[in-house]
Image: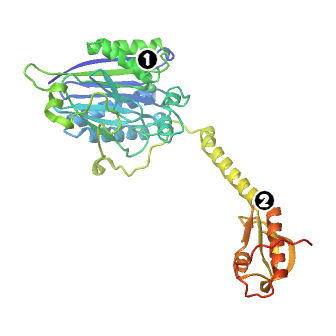
Amino acid sequence: MRFVIGSATDVGRARAAKANEDSFLVVDEAGVYAVADGMGGHRAGEVASAAAVRAVEESFGGGAPLAEAVAVANAEVFAQARANPEMRGMGTTVTAVQVGQQSWHFAHVGDSRAYLFRDGQLTQVTEDHSLVEELVREGRLTPEEAAVHPQRSIITRALGVDEAVDVDTYDVDLYAGDRVLMCSDGLTSMLRDASISKILKAQADPQAAADKLVDAANDAGGEDNITVVVIDAVGEQGDDVSAKARAFAAGAHAQPPGAEATGEWDRVEGDDDLIESAAPRSRPRAVTVWQVARWVVPLVAIVAIAAAALGWYARNSYYVGFAGDRVALYQGVPDGLLWWDPTVETRTDLGADDLSANDHDQVVGGKEFSSRGAAERYLRSLRAKATTTTSSTSTSSTPPTSTTR
Ligand code: MN
């Protein structure tokens, strides 16, 4: 297997006067590639993404596994931010891949992405560490809403903002003919997956594909820096490693071409010893009062509505129970509800001896009604039974009696 690479980066249209804070890494000898999207004022974003890819290259070149190299890059960016007040708060995404003969090994933090393009199908490998992606997972946004959401660039995990970082890793079987795309959000915030797929399908040469993708993102507005790395896995003559050949050999283990992204990849858990994955998630790019209010205000509203509903229920419920040793009609719920205690509305002169055993049991527990009228009808039936039965030993078999008074 050999690998043919295309890469391109551009400052974008909207930032024409500003800097390109993206960096990328192409090291064919080591078989390692990466894209990084930096953040932070005073050009700190440029510094962060460049330092991260350099650290990944050095650490990986020194023999570290890819995920560990990304963790080392985190420590490096964090140390630089701490040492230089101008760089405080800087951070960067990193999406990296190591190519093997049988597998693609990905390591990922942030909202840059890796895609696999195989048999004409585009599948996103990495999961974004972004606010909108979390809202999609919680069912609060559709993917379509997330794609155009004004806060889609807020990330929930980044390199360099904390001493330790969780690094997601993905291992994907590699077949001749596979094409991997890694890109910063300047591409994916401008182009839908369908447009990206179309370009990848039309451009056989990886460099031409990289250039066309950047052009298309600029044509669509170019609102952010755009960086893409395209990697083609090309089978050598004599290699029996085409996707179809391996799928045939592997039988049921093979992935159908149209398989869903979910569950398709072997998601490899972070190596706790290396990455200290117990560390809390890094802070988002910017947390404003408004963002906090977005979560708190609906919560307060839900609690208020629930309390109002309970209050309404408590005030519109009635029951018949004992007030001392006499039967009474109460407004409210037996034992009360939150701060709404029941109140006695009508007292009767009926005592325990006037009730049948069955009625007595019900009244002791508080017999509930959804209207005052129903509760009063029940009271009238108790009174009627009391005047027509002569013995307190009567049972519930006493038929309902209608009386005129
Ligand atoms: Mn970006």
Q: Position of residue 376 (x, y in %)?
A: 83, 67
Work out whether mark 1 precedes mark 2 in sequence or the reverse, and give the earlier one: 1
The quadrant holding residue 140 is top right
Quadrant for the N terminus, please: top left
Element marked by disc 1: loop
Quadrant for the C terminus, please: bottom right
Which amino acid lies under the numbered mark 2 shown in the image of this protein? Asn
Give 331 or 340, whichever is nearer the viewer: 331
Image region (quadrant) for ligand 1: top left
Disc number placed over residue 198 in the picture, else none? none
Q: Is residue 187 left or right of residue 269?
A: right
Q: CA distance from mark 1 to mark 2?
A: 65 Å
Q: Residues within 10 Å of mark 2 (few under 14, many from 20)?
A: some
Give 38 or 80, whichever is nearer the viewer: 38
The quadrant holding residue 12 is top left
Front label number (1 vs 2):
2
Which amino acid lies under the numbered mark 1 shown in the image of this protein? Val
Q: Position of residue 250 (x, y in %)?
A: 16, 35
- Relative to 344, residue 41 above or below: above
Q: Position of residue 351 (x, y in %)?
A: 81, 83
Which residue is tagged 1?
11
Which residue is tagged 2?
316
**Cβ(mark 2) to ligand 1 < 8 Å?**
no
Element marked by disc 2: loop
The answer to whether residue 333 is visible is no
Q: Residue at x 43, y 49 (%)?
A: 280
Q: Residue at x 34, y 50 (%)?
A: 276
- Relative to 182, residue 211 above or below: above
Q: Is residue 30 left or right of residue 90?
A: left
Q: Position of residue 385 (x, y in %)?
A: 80, 78
